[in-house]
Image (tube, rainbow, N blue to C red):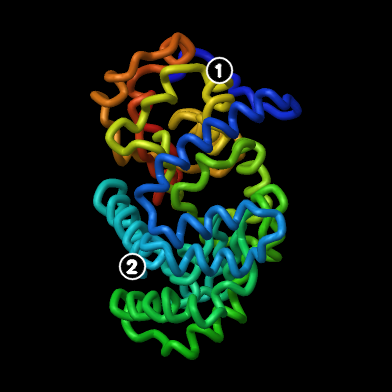
Amino acid sequence: MLRRPVAISPPCRGNVNRMNLSALGNLSHRLKLVGTLPPKLVAAKIAKRLPWSNKRAVRIAEIVHSPKDREADRLLGFFRTQESFLVENEGWAPIDFTGRNVLEIGPGPLGGLSLMAVFRGAERVYGVEPDWVDDVLTDPAIEDAYLRPHHNVLSAAFGNLMDYATFRTRLGERLKIDAVGLSDATPGFAADIVLSNSCLEHIGDLPDALSALVDFTADDARHMHLVNFGNHRDREAPFATIYEMPPDQYRLKYGAHINLLRASDVFAASASAGLGLSMAIVDQPVEKAEAVDLHPYWRDNYEMDDLAVRTALYFTPMSNETESPIP
């Protein structure tokens, strides 16, 4: 529980020294990853940062050489696990995509859950992904490496709702993803279903973004958002580095890759935006939070039950009552 309102400072801008230190912190982290990634994937990631590189060619190379991106059932697995959790613990009714308008926040380089929405009969699907590159899904290499296998996974999970040719055609007709943030979205419809998976924690201006989201959603829209409050660096020590320093120092050292809002902050932001969401804690390893030498900023502003939340789901409750498990 928040002891008092917390002001999270915005990312540092305009200070060259701070930006350089942040870049060095990110570079150090990336160098540690080099030994764990395929060499061709490392080369693609380096090329991505060259201003003269062909964005589409580099993105295709990233995907083709990324074992994670080529896992055809990975994103569907996340969705089904999350929805099953809500069904079992929150009385959630599974989402019916038929004829619905769907908005996905942060679908990633391959369109995320939006492809599933189209396969399951959504009328229109719109995604916002600042790092999106057009025409990647239609490349033959991506079709072979991901799109065809993903269609096979969807068919095995939900039945033969459409053949591959129809699936590919409908993606072209019904799916649009823009390389913008949520505040600049132009879906052209009021969304019936709004989804995100480990994305909201990366939006620096999340309260403003959620306020903008209200304008794009129907009054009875169904939301399901998984938020990961860890450091996205170390699964065994998810809160290390975060709680060892105040937010400004963390951004200075590691960059602004996460907004550092905690579970109660996200719930408060969604409530302030008028989204009417409830929160369900998925993972709360208290021992991992207690193992960190807490900086006074975190100790003075948050209770341990809030600091210990690693993942949580924010969703539209089946009743009219919204709630947070953190008092």
- Disc 2: CA contacts within 10 A as few (<14), some (14-19) or many (>=20): some
Residue 149, image quadrant: bottom left
Q: Position of residue 167 (x, y in %)?
A: 48, 84
Cα distance in 3D space between marks 1 and 2: 41 Å
Q: Which mark is residue 73?
A: 2
The one nearer the camera, 121 or 241, is: 241
- Name the residue: 56% across, 34% down: 269
Q: Secondary structure at mark 1?
A: loop
Q: Is residue 188 left or right of residue 129?
A: right
- Name the residue: 42% across, 24% down: 241
Residue 217, image quadrant: bottom right
Q: Which mark is residue 282?
A: none
Is residue 96 positioned above or below 234 on the image?
below
Q: Secondary structure at mark 2?
A: loop
Q: Position of residue 17 (x, y in %)?
A: 68, 23
- Name the residue: 45% across, 45% down: 320
**Amino acid found under the numbered disc labelled 1:** Pro
**Amino acid found under the numbered disc labelled 2:** Asp
Q: Position of residue 25 (x, y in %)?
A: 52, 31
- Name the residue: 33% across, 23% down: 305
Residue 227 visible: yes
The one nearer the camera, 198 or 174, is: 198
Q: Earlier in the sequence, mark 1 or mark 2?
A: 1
**Mark 1 or mark 2: which is in front?**
2
Quadrant where the N terminus is found in the figure: top left
The one nearer the camera, 36 or 172, is: 36
Quadrant where the C terminus is found in the figure: top left
Q: Which residue is mark 1?
A: 5
